[in-house]
Image: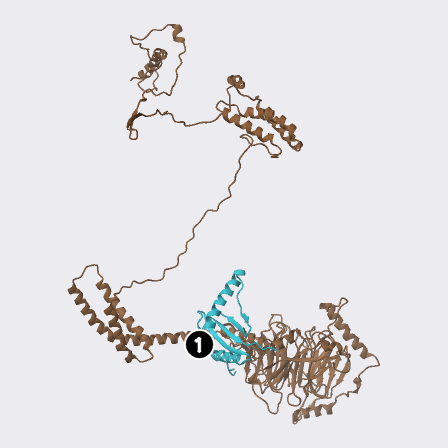
Amino acid sequence: MSRYPKYSESNEVEEAIKRILSHKGVVGLVVINHEGIPIKSTMENALSVQYAAQVTQLLDKSRSMIKELDSNNDLTFIRLRTKKHEVLVCPEKDYAMIVIQNPTES
Amino acid sequence: MPPKGPKGAGGGGGGGKRRGKGRRDDDEYGGYARKEQQLSKPPDQEKLTETQMKQDVQRYLVTLDPTVVRDRVRWDFNERAYLIVPYQDETITLFHMDSKLVHKDHAEEFKKTYPYPMVPRKQAKQLDKQLQESYKKTEPAPAPVTAAAPPTTEAQASVDAEGEGEEKKSDAKPEEEEEEKEEPKEVTRQTKFLNQFDYSDRSTQTYNNPLREHVCQTQPPPRSNYKDYCNAWIIYDAYENDVENRPKQGKQHGGGAELGAIGEELGEQVAGAPAGEDGNPQTPEKEKEKKEKKEAVRKERDKEGKIHEKERVRMRKASVLEGQAAQEAALNKSAEGLKILERLVMQNVHHEVLFDFKYYEDASDEFRETGEGTILPLWKFAYDRAKRLHVTGISWSQSEPDMFAVSYGSFSFTHPITDGMVLVWSLRNPAFPEQIWVSPRGCMCVAVHPEANCLVAVGMYDGNVAMIQLKPDEDNATSSVVLKNVHVIQKHRSPIWSVKWGEDDMDGDPNFYSCGLDGRIIHWTIDTSDSNGVGGLGGTEICILHLPVAPVTGPDGTSYKLFGCARVLAFHPKEKTTFLVGTAEGNIFRCSSLYGSRFQQIYNAHFLPVAALEWNYYHKDVFISCSEDWTIKIWDKKDPEPMYVFEIGVAILDCCWAPYSSTVFAAVTEEGKTLVYDLNVNKEKPICCQQIVTKKKVKPHRIQFNPYYPILCVGDDRGQLTTLKLSPNLRILPKDSRGAPMEGDSKITFEIGKMAKLLSLVRDPESITNPKSLARPDEKQVKIVLSAMGKK
């Protein structure tokens, strides 16, 4: 029985991040940990920190809102469409991921 | 002054008293021992006559206090004279109650004084009731009532107001009541008048919940006391030390070192301070000594301090690195979140396509008279590592409408590409497959289990099969469990062309069938008993396709039967044991999995290999076959001749029925065109013929309908998959009398009816196609075919 090559985990994550960044309209990506500190970012530091701070607050507020309305429910992701671009936030247990994208306009 | 009672009472009273006292005095035991005692009279006792003794003597109690001084004087400073203190009555009123009761003996006297007539109580109540009623009736004309009112009220009032000390109040009350009643116009009272007998006060109190105090206290943060001096010279010294240290440390630790140095200083001070802050006052000498000591210690510590600083910086670096490592570890778990995020991004990038997919309906279809339609290309799925591979099989999942598995391998057997893979895609993310499974040998076919969509069966180029279980991405487990066939004997010895899932067997285990170029159809189940201890797939051969020709003599004289090289496998959707096998010789065998040696029927279908074979979803007797000999044929299983034949003129590489209609099917040609036919609309021409891929450069190999959405998926030989949306004309759904689309059983029967009608048309003498134009293949032809295949 021959072995089938498996992708290493970190490699996969890196690849995935690269892929996301390569899509049309993606401005930047920030990964923040549970404290709200950006651990990985493709934008400049000051902006990342700003995004991280604001998004953490938003996550806490929306999560508490959903839990209050129904304690069995939980937040999956947030899409914030603004005039200039769209902010996609995907929270997980230990971290949250933020992607800023310019949605393509027909 | 001795207290003296009234004179008249003194003697008799005294005598009486004495008598009583005498009795008691003689009682030694305080009343318990009651012995008859003789009365002893004192000698100077007054002697009374009988009549005098029987006389009642009255005794009175008076509140006059004889001991009270009445002419008390007091010095008044204002008047500067002695003033008599006014006598104050030394009585205390403990209880006072106004009474309405009059002693019956005095009633007569009271009546005289009392101005109003008195009536017994019961009568008074009756009178009151009468009054009430009279009020209710005669509201607008209260005047005559008023005349009657006072006497009755008086009567009532009088009864109520009987009492000695009650005079004032009783007078007031009836007067009030009278006044009230004299003004009935102003006050319309229908309620009873409030008085002490009829009025009652009722009150309730809600149940007050007991208050409870609930206190929660967190653990206070740990505290430490810190004491220090701060003087001008301490600050100066600290700065001096810092300036000394700075150029030695270098730029990197410059900022940190400053803080570090000062921190060290303060640390020292902390150590030194408690000693100096002892409560005892210290002499200046001692203080000086201490200072010197401190300085010496500090100097030593300076050196130590530098070392400490370095270490501290190093520690800080290490902790930062640790933090980073932890962060990276956390990052690695973010694969799932990234997946979701990627889908979100994809949604944005392809949002037009998404809208088309969901909502776009080609409006021009209404204006096409011939009922033609169009197909709109949606997404393109391509994986960069699969670019040079051919799409060999597409299988949509039946339970997840957006999931499909694609096998990549190679169809060119002269230049075989040895490796292959199976990718599971989702419509939500056209950029990257959901699951990747790489195999060292090319994969030829793939099938997703109709119910448990985590099971995928793969057939490979070398004759092996594998069953993959796709695991959800928990804990970053991207690897999937793979079961491979283990036996060497019971396996295909040539490429497997088709795998199809069968029904779960009695144990509930999934099982599937595969057919290969060696002409065998093998049934695979999970074989838990294995020599290695690892479970594999065990296969049992169901049947071998023997060609219906005479045995051929081999080179060494032994004659052996020719067997067909199976190309396609198609299981009946309802009768799970019946299946069709299409061979490379162009035959179609209808077999049953219950008995393997004999076939139910053999159809001499095509000249060239059968490329695709599929049963109709609705009509149980109808199936379609297409071949590289430029024809698509629709068969009724009972008839050895096909019902409909479509001559396309180009090799057909794949065809399939539509899941929503019994008369719609699609096919891909070698040129890159996709054809969609609807037999209900047009029996000769396709209602859609569209070029999907670049002509002559790219060959589409596979086509499949999505079971839920009106989508086709076409896979080509560049490793690309194109999804296409069908326009409304291509997917005309039957409508019932109300105009709503049919569903369920009625739809099934309708579809079956449609097909049956079409079949009956064909069976008429005036048939559209000429099925008898096909010649039956004979031995020669078989050999030609075999040799042609050999050349390939």
Q: Residue under circle 1?
A: A45
Of A67 and B746, nearer the camera is A67
Q: Position of residue B244 (x, y in %)?
A: 26, 77
Question: To which quarter of the image does residue B406 belong?
Answer: bottom right
Of B416 and B430, nearer the camera is B430
Q: Locate the N terminus of chain B and report the quarter of the image it occupies.
A: top left
Q: Locate the C terminus of chain B and report the quarter of the image it occupies.
A: bottom right
Give the secondary structure at mark 1: helix
- Residue B504 in view in this figure: no
Subunit of mark 1?
A
- State the residue lying farthest toward the left: B285
- State the residue lying farthest toward the front: B79
Q: Position of residue B101 (x, y in %)?
A: 51, 23
Question: To which quarter of the image does residue B89 belong?
Answer: top left
Of B84 and B208, nearer the camera is B84
Numbered label tally: 1
Q: Position of residue B445 (x, y in %)?
A: 62, 82
Q: Residues within 10 Å of mark 1 (few under 14, many from 20)?
A: few
Q: Position of residue B352 (x, y in %)?
A: 62, 77
Q: Is residue B376 above or below residue B263?
A: below
Question: Any idea which chain is the cyan one in this picture?
Answer: A
State the hue of chain B: brown
- Residue A89 in view in this figure: yes
> In the image, what residue type sits under mark 1?
Asn
Left or right: residue B164 versus residue B694 is: left
Left or right: residue A105 versus residue B686 is: left
Left or right: residue B727 versus residue B284 is: right
